Structure formats: structure tokens, C-alpha cells
Amino acid sequence: MIEVIAEPEFQKVDGSEKTFPLKTSAVIDYASYDCEVNRVDFRPTLMYAARTFKFTIKNTSLINLDFNFKIANSSTGILDAGPYSIIPKKGSIAPDCDDNFIVKFSPIEVEADFSRILSANINNLNPNKDALIIEANGIAERPVIHFELPPSTYREKKEKDMTPVDTKLKVIEFESLGTNIKNTKRFMAVNPTSSGYEFEWEEIPDLDKKQKPLFRCVTPKGLILSGKKSEMVFEYTPDSVGEHESKWVFRIPSEGITQTFLVVGHVNEPNVLFQTGKLKFGPLLLQGKNKETIRIINQEHIPFAFNFSKESVKGSPDYGDSLRVSPMSGVVPALSDLPIEINFSPKFELTYNYNLTCNVKRKARPLVFNIKGEGYKIHHSVFADEPKVEVSSSSPFDL
């Protein structure tokens, strides 16, 4: 028994005593585990890169196994994780269950000794069971160049599409919201060596695709000093919706180093639309006026400019100036909408059919809105109830 919980205050009522059977159970055991790993040796790893090792711990006891990993320097015993980390670091494993652990080795400098001790503090560990200790060691190598590229899922996506990407290629990925807009991607290149060098970029032409270049390197040449970083800048200006690729080669001539990059661009059509796709005014007396309001909706996180085509508002030459749109141009705020007034005043007695086109910046295709209406006028007719009488222009006729 660990603690007795005090009863709340109460007042005893005579004759109310009752006896109930209370069944209790308890599980008593020491924590114990099963782990086949006691040493991890990582292969030589480039600075700024990473390697991982996966292992399993099984709880062989009848109680929860509560653990907390600590990483210490094997020489000094001082807590010092260095380039190592473990996931999960702290937690609990249910009885007769297991959990997977991942040790990560990610050096950022070359050192002579990377040996560390990973020890798990386990609550109520069986005195006859050795403490869980794993020795870790690794070797770091200094690269000539390191690129600080953001993570990309393009490789995994292409593997699912059964079109795998060469593992030797580094991927630079763009996302463009619409077409005919300049998108910029910036990343740093690090020179971890003891001497500076010059670099250059060159695009590998694709002879099978005869199209104007969509990608441009803003930093085609430059110098990276020892221990410094240099910013690399690429631009992507798509002219059509879809996915575009281009291969580039990065060179360090003095070191004989080359690295091929796959530059990828994705174009997403901006989600800007009309509240409805059509409007019907119905019959309207000539020179009469009718007004309706429609809304143009912007579901994106940035504003978009728009303008209506004057030719589409004018419609057929037979329509005259029967339709007006206000405003003809403007900007729809981000995550908002804008009212558009449609005024219809038929000038001629006929049926009207307009297909308004609204050009939205960055959209490859304009929005189309259909408007129908009809103009009419009142026609007068005079009829005589008398029988038909033959008359001539020379003879008088009396009614």
C-alpha cells in the first residue's frame, strides 16, 4: 500500500449501516525488458547529412515499463548528446508490448571521437536485470559543398506514379499560384572547407521539348569563401497549368565537383470564381432598366486583380449599348468577395445572350458568365367591326 485516501466528512445515521463485499486485485512485478541491441556503429556520414538506426524494446513484465533515455559522453560521463538523438526519448510501454526507437546521427562538424552512451532510466527495474545501455559511434566526413535545401516530397510522389527519380539528383521544387507570374526560390550553399572556390550553374537542354525556358538561375556564377555561405536564387515563370521539369548542373571547376539538380515547378490554378455561372433577366420593356448583383469570390490567401473584356460586355453589334457592368476592373481581397453590378436596359426588340469574360491575373483561362435577357415594346392595332366596303380614292365614304 502506497497511500491511504482520507474519507470525506460525513455524519453517521443510526441504523443505516450495510455490509458490501469488495473485490480487489493487484499486479505486483518488477519492470523487465528484452532488447537485442547494445551497440550502434554508423557508417561514415557527411557533415549536415544524417543516418538513422532502428531497434525495438519489448516489455516482458506484467506492469508498464516507464523509460527515459539520456545520452552521455563515453569518456567523461557528462550528459552530452553531441550529434545523436533518439525518438521517443521518454515514454511508457504496456505489458507484453514493444516499441520502436530511432537513433539519429547528424554531425555538423568533423571530430576525432563521436562515441556516446545511450542509457535508459527504467522505473522499478528488476534488480537482477542489467540496465539498458547502448554504445553509439560514428564517423563524420567533411564535404566540399553542402546545400541547405528545404525538404521535398517530389521523389516519393514520382515513385508512387511508377516514374522514379534518380537518387543522385537533388530536387529544387516550386509551387506557383497561377501562370505568368515570377516565382523565386532561394537557398544557401555552404563551403565547409579551408579554402574558397568559384562555382557555376548550367542548364541541361532538353532536345525533346521545344519550349521557351521557364526556369532561370539568377546566380549563374560566384565565389564561396572558406567557412561561408552563398545564396543561390532560381526563378520560375510558367505559362501553362501543369508540372514542369528542368535539369541543371552545379560545378566547382577547381575541385572537379559536379552535382545535377532536378528543378520542378507545379502550377495551381487560383481558386477565384463567380458565385453563380449565369443570370437571366427575362422580358423587359425597351428603355426599361433592371439591375442584379453577382459576386466574384477569392478563396486564396492573396488578392487577385480582375478585368472584364469590353467586347464581351458589348456583345453582338445588334445589341447596342444594352448592358453595363460595374466595376469593370478591380482587386478581390484575399479570402473575400466583391459585388459586381449588372445593369440591363434593352435598346432593341430582340433576345439577348451575353458571355462575359473576366480575366483574372495569374489564371490561365478567363472566367465566363452567361447573361440572357429579352427586349420588347407595346404594339398598337386598330380593327373595324363594320362589314367590308369597297371604296376608291375619288368617291366619298360616309361612316
Image (cartoon, helix red, strand yellow):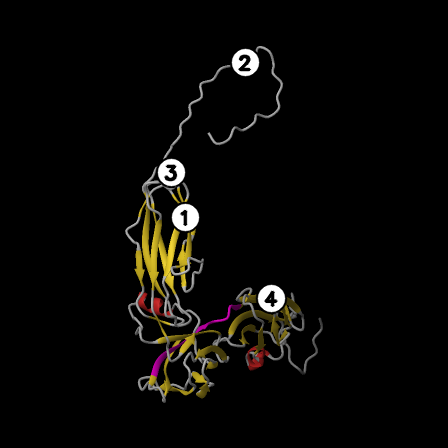
Whether residue 29 is in magenta: the answer is: no
- Decide if residue 394 is on the left or right side of residue 126: right
Question: What is the secondary structure assignment of the residue under circle 2?
Answer: loop
Question: What is the secondary structure assignment of the residue under circle 3?
Answer: loop
Q: Which residue is mark 1?
A: 121
Mark number, residue 351? none
User: Could you say which quadrant of the image residue 156 lies in?
Assistant: bottom left
Q: Are marks 4 and 1 in contact (CB under 8 Å)?
A: no
Labels 2 and 3: the sequence-earlier one: 2
Q: CA distance from mark 4 to mark 1?
A: 58 Å
Q: Amino acid at mark 2?
A: Glu
User: Is residue 352 in view from this perspective?
Assistant: yes
- Decide if residue 142 is on the left or right side of residue 352: left
Of 274 and 178, nearer the camera is 178
Mark number, residue 17? 2
Whether residue 267 is in magenta: the answer is: yes
Mark number, residue 63? 3
| Residue farthest toward the top in the current orientation of the protein | 15
